[in-house]
Amino acid sequence: MLKVKDIMTRPVVVIRSSATIENAIWLMRAKRVRSLIVEKSHEDGAYGILTEKDIVYKVIAMGENPHFVRVGSIMRQPCIQAPANATVREAAQILANAGIHRAPVIEQNELIGIISVTDILAKGGPTTPPRDELAEQIQEALQHARIIDDADAQMEQDCDLAWQIFEDMRFSPKATV
């Protein structure tokens, strides 16, 4: 079963709470990310998070100057976190319950990655697509076929074999191709 640590994004782009929103915008654009994790202010402190949405709603929409607003004044801290050993399903539930799109991944009180809805959708699904009956029969036949050293000849043989199985299934009374 896939865990958060298997699909999370690393490295994480981190910023200090004392940085300006202007710096944060520049960093987000340079690193092509939609959020930044805000460093802990002290060892026992909590991580924070700053998202594009925070910047739009709390700075731009309010007519504030990004050059003067500090990250620490609009970030969310403490932020919802995802355990590294949580399953992908558990992570999806954490994000859904909190109504958020991303969360830092923490292991032994240290930041090791970030998990997002995009990570879950892109990497959290089955690793191999389900196989239908035709694909299963073709794979079995290929395993029993003789090995040919020439790659082009092997491909031609594989295609011929697949076509033959397809034709057999097509004209079989119980086949539904």
Image (cartoon, grey):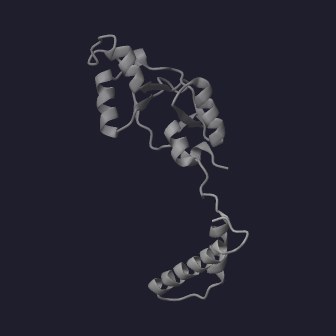
Q: How many numbered marks does the figure carry?
A: 0
Q: Is residue 71 visible?
A: no
Q: Is residue 62 visible?
A: yes
Q: Nearer the viewer, residue 164 or 115?
A: 164
Residue 118 placement (x, y as % from top left)? 49, 40
Query: Residue visible at 51% across and 31% down?
Result: 101
Q: Is residue 35 above or below residue 67?
A: below
Residue 176 placement (x, y as % from top left)? 67, 64
Residue 156 placement (x, y as % from top left)? 49, 83
Q: Is residue 115 above or below residue 139?
A: above
Q: Nearer the viewer, residue 164 or 130?
A: 164
Q: Nearer the viewer, residue 61 or 33?
A: 61
Residue 128 placement (x, y as % from top left)? 60, 58
Query: Residue visible at 58% across and 81% down?
Result: 161
Q: Nearer the viewer, residue 3 or 142?
A: 142
Query: Residue visible at 34% across and 15% down?
Result: 59
Which quadrant does the C terminus fall into? bottom right
Query: Residue visible at 37% across and 21% down?
Result: 55
Q: Is residue 120 above or below residue 97?
A: below
Q: Is residue 13 left or right of residue 123?
A: left
